[in-house]
Image (cartoon, rainbow, N blue to C red):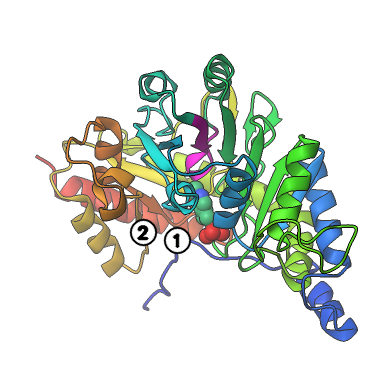
Amino acid sequence: MTRQKISVASPILNGNEKKYVLDCIETAWISSNGKYIREFEDKFATFCNVKHSISCCNGTVALHLPLLAYGVGPGDEIIVPTLTYIATANAVVYCGAKPVLVDSEPITWNIDPVKIEEKITKNTKGIIVAHLYGHPVDMDPIMDIAKKYNLFVIEDAAEAHGALYKNRKVGSIGDVGTFSFFGNKIITTGEGGMIVTNNDELNEKIRLLKGQGMDPQRRYWFQIVGYNYRMTNIEAAIGLAQLEKISWHLNKRREVADLYYKHLSELSDYIELPIEREWARHSFWMFSILLKDRVKISRDEFMGLLDSDGIETRPIFYPMHVMPPYFEKENNYPVANLVSSRGMNIPSHGLLSEEDIQYIASRVKKYCLQYLK
Ligand SMILES: *Cc1c(COP(=O)(O)O)cnc(C)c1O
C-alpha cells in the first residue's frame, strides 16, 4: 500500500469557519468593513493581553506598518536576526532603511542578545526579534539593551501565536507585536496579519496608515499618503473561528511535539531536537531536527531520502546574509550557518497521528544509522 504524502503543514478548519464565512456571503459583507473584523481584533487583543489589536492583510505588512509609524526611513538601521523568514528584513528595506543582521544563539536559534550591542550605531532606531519556529526569544536582555540605547522593539511573532515568555504572551512584551495568518501558520485566515500594542498613539498611526491615510472623522479626507493594507471581513470571519479554538490548535501541536520527543529521543547521538527553555512555552509551529556531524550525509540528501518515502520536509531558513538581497561576503554568523545547513523542519501540523509520527521517526532513524561513520 502506498502512503499518502505527509505534508509539513496543513490548515485545520474544524470550527465555525464555514458558518461565519457563509454569514459574510449571505449578508454581502465581504470587503474590509463588517462585524468580524472588529470582533477578531478585540478577541485577539484579549488573547494577547494587550490594549490594541489591528488587523491587516498579511504578516509582512504587519511589520511594515509599525516601522512606518515609527518614521523609519533612509539612513536608519534596524537590528534583525539573520536567521528568520525574509519578510522580517524586507519590511525594513521597504522603508528605505538598512537591516543590520545578528547571529543566532545555539540553543533556540533565536537572535543572540549578546551579539546585539556590537551592531548598534548612532543610526540604529530599533530591534526586530523573531520568535523562530515558535520558541520565544529571551526578551529581558533585549528590552534592557533597547532601554539603554532608546530603541523600539518589534516582536515578529508570525510563528509563535500563544507562545509564552515568562508566562507572558509573545507579542505583548516589546513595543509592538506582529502576527501572520498565512495558511501554514498556527492559526490562519488564508492571508492575513495582526499588529498588537499597548501604545495608543502607535495604534492610531497604524490605523491611519493601513486605511489609505483617511481621516477617521472625515470621510475621503486624506491626511497623509497611506496604504491599503486592510484585512477583509471574510478573512476575519475565518480568523475569529480559528481563534475560538486556538487552545485546541496549540494543544494538538504540543501533542505532536511530545510524540516526536517520545519516538526520536533515542537518536540523540545523531540528531538534535528542539529545546524548550525553562522560562518558555514553545508553540511548536514547526518541529525541527538538526543532523549531527556523525551523520555523514548532507541535509539536502537526507531530505531527499525522506521525500522518497513520502515525507515532506523543509530546510531551515537560509540566513539573510547568504542570499542576494542581503549578501555579506564576510559571513560572520557561525551559528546561523550551522543551523541552516544541517537543520530541517519535519511535518508539524495537528492532523498527524501517532502512526504518522512513528513512521517518520522510523525513517529518520533508518537514514541516521545508514550513513554513519
Ligand atoms: C510568515 C512570516 C512572516 C510573514 O507573513 P506573511 O503573512 O506570509 O506575509 C513574517 N515573519 C516571519 C518570521 C514569518 O514566519
Mark 2 touches mark 1? (CB < 8 Å): yes
- Residue type of the residue flagged with mark 1: Val
* Rendered position, 293 above or below 88: above
Q: Residue at x 35, y 49 (%)?
A: 316
Which badge, 2 or 1, is on the more N-terminal residue? 1
Residues in magenta? Answer: 125-136
Which corner quadrant holds the C terminus?
Answer: top left
Measured as percent of width and height from the top left, residue 358 is found at: 42, 54
Other-residue count near label 2 (Cα within 10 Å), few / some / many at <14 / 14–19 / ≥20: many
- Label 1 sits on residue: 8
Based on the displayed image, in which of its 4 quarters is residue 312 positioned?
A: bottom left
Question: Helix, strand, or loop for circle 1?
Answer: loop
- Label 2 sits on residue: 313
Question: Helix, strand, or loop for circle 2?
Answer: loop
- Residue type of the residue flagged with mark 2: Thr
Q: Residue at x 82, y 42 (%)?
A: 46
Q: Residue at x 21, y 36 (%)?
A: 331
